[in-house]
Amino acid sequence: MTAQEIRSAYFEFFKARQHQVISRALLVPLNDPTTLFTGSGMQPLIPYLLGEPHSEGKRLVDSQTCFRAQDVDEVGDNRHTTFFEMLGNWSLGDYFKAEQLPWFFEFLTDVVGLDPTKIYVTCFIGDEANGIPRDTESADIWTKLFETKGIDAKKVDIGSEANGGKVGMQAGRIFYYDASKNWWCRAGKIGDMPAGEPGGPDSEVFYEFDFIEHDAKYGENCHPNCDCGRYMEIGNSVFMEYIKTETGFEKLPKQNVDFGGGLERISAAQLNSPDVFKISILKPIIDKLEAISDKSYDSHTESMRVIADHLRAATFLAVDGVVPSNKEQGYVMRRLLRRAIRYAFDLGIEQNFLEQIVPIIADLYHADFPEVAASRDRIVETLVKEEKVFRQTLRRGLREFEKLFTVIPTSVEGTIKDGSFDSAQDDKQTSQRSHGEALFTLYDTYGFPVELSVEEAFKQNVELDANWREQFDAKMAEQRQRSQTASKGVFKGGLGGQTLQHRKYHTATHLMYQALREVLGDHVVQRGSNITEERLRFDFSQPEKVTPEQIKQVEDIVNQQIANDLKISFEEYPTKVAVEEKGALGQFGDRYGETVKVYKMIADGADKPFSFEICGGPHVDHTAQLAEGGKHFKITKEESSSAGIRRIKAVLV
């Protein structure tokens, strides 16, 4: 089966079991500044897993496109990709373990055709300190499923990952791990879960590539979570079963199932190949690279893997509206493209080549994702334009290299300390950066790949500090930590959290948006927002500065609507109905899913609402809550954000 056929079969399998197919969420979460990308299949559905009703019912199935920027540097091996599809099925308070595990096993063995003797599973070993028992229910279900295939499935305790090497695969087929491997909660660890937080055990499925020998550097014996490459995780069923209380854990009255299975990895298992780049949605890209470079995949494996992954990810980012830039999602996209172009040098491809590769990628997805077909020409144009710009960037990077690495003449007073330039007389040598920091500046500011910087240093007889790599890696680690910190949390509506203060400022943002349109005109369209507990920030289209008189008008309108104590509620509509028939304001046009929430703010007895806007929520229940403590709405700053975009900051004081 091809990957496309596996995706289609998965939908049909669960549609036959009363699941509704839902559209994928965008790679860039709507109105969510706390995370740059949709990094898991679960992420867009967390509100529903936490109890909010879904318009499509209690049984859902999808294939969610995901992007993980933290995996960029891992690409090059046989299984890591920054972009991937997560097949998902969901039970919102409906079925549970007794249905989920047999269904997935049936899909893998009877539909995809995987050899059951190569399937291994893991379960939660329990947590005695918190009174959470061992998940024997899942293990017993697995035992019976393996028995149907004539397999004696022995159970083995592994415990923590650190103890994983003590017991080998020969000892069993069902492995118990502790919470570091087989427990899900948003806090990450059981001990960090606050009261009221749900969580539960999970059960992972691994596929064995028995022709790969275990590497003893990963432990004396192999086991499912071993990193030697012999076993690949292909699916994980999360059972949201418990809720943390002030005194411990209790069973949730409504328990959920969240399943995620990597399409690329299941497809690789179907081929019995540990190399995901040989599956049907990646190999055509590799084939094209071989054709235009006249090089083989076997001899240039890493370069071709990086190019294929990065261009596939960049293509879908472009589909979802991202354009290359020096900020946030655009910066990550730019980095992907520039790394791909750098690795193309290894293949001898030094001329523009994206216009040959990107259409191949689009053709792999256009039949199953209509939005790819609809935006194909725009995608190609966007990515090819960036490639041409980067050719210029390379030249600029070389000039900056000259500035940062000019050899200090002997006639100039000054010294070189710890590999850093220290000169009072030559402007070109006043930088106190170490070589590693200079290389990071070239990489981070000018998009100049560090590998090219090192090569240029060699050509110009510049001897780099012995510890330049440590210095560079330290700066990269700082950047990665900032990225990971920014990716934590899953909140909606431009919120940095979900406290009452966040909800107040979110509600005030809606009021201000409508007030701006009343004062300035209907050309005002939201272009971004960010909300903290201290203030709101709102970007909107506006060709000229907002005058003090207009700001005062906006403040007066907002404060009047707060005093009017508008009631706030929402309804779900099909997106087309919400926008075209109901007239709801929406920032993202056709980038919404099939259904949307529309929040209404209306005074008692009024004929129409003051604000009627597509939004993910949450808000306060009525606007008078914004005035609690004698507070009123005040705009503190109005400024330019970019060409044609103004930015307002406001507070409740």
Image: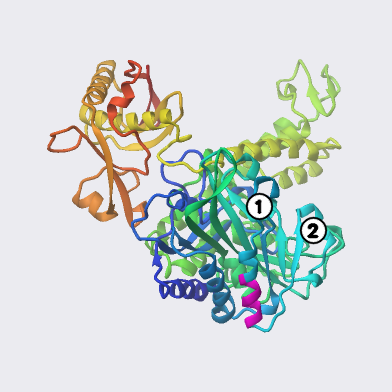
Q: Name the residue under label 1.
A: 342
Q: Is mark 1 on a helix, strand or loop?
A: helix
Q: At 26% across and 25% down in the image, what residue appears?
A: 562
- Residue 486 as seen in the image, left or right of residue 592: right
Which is more toward the observer, 288 or 647? 647
Q: At 72% across and 33% down in the image, what residue appears?
A: 438
Q: Name the residue under label 2.
A: 164
Q: Give the range drawn in magenta.
A: 141-148
Say whether residue 18 is visible.
yes
Q: Where is the N terminus found, in terms of image quarters? A: bottom right
Q: Position of residue 305 (x, y in %)?
A: 66, 62
Q: Position of residue 651 (x, y in %)?
A: 38, 21
Which is more toward the observer, 516 or 158? 158
Residue 228 sits above or below residue 420 on the image:
below
Q: Is mark 2 on a helix, strand or loop?
A: helix
Residue 536 sits above or below residue 151 on the image:
above
Say whether residue 234 is visible.
no
Q: Which amino acid does label 2 sit on?
A: Gly
Q: Position of residue 366 (x, y in %)?
A: 43, 67
Which is more toward the observer, 560 or 256? 256
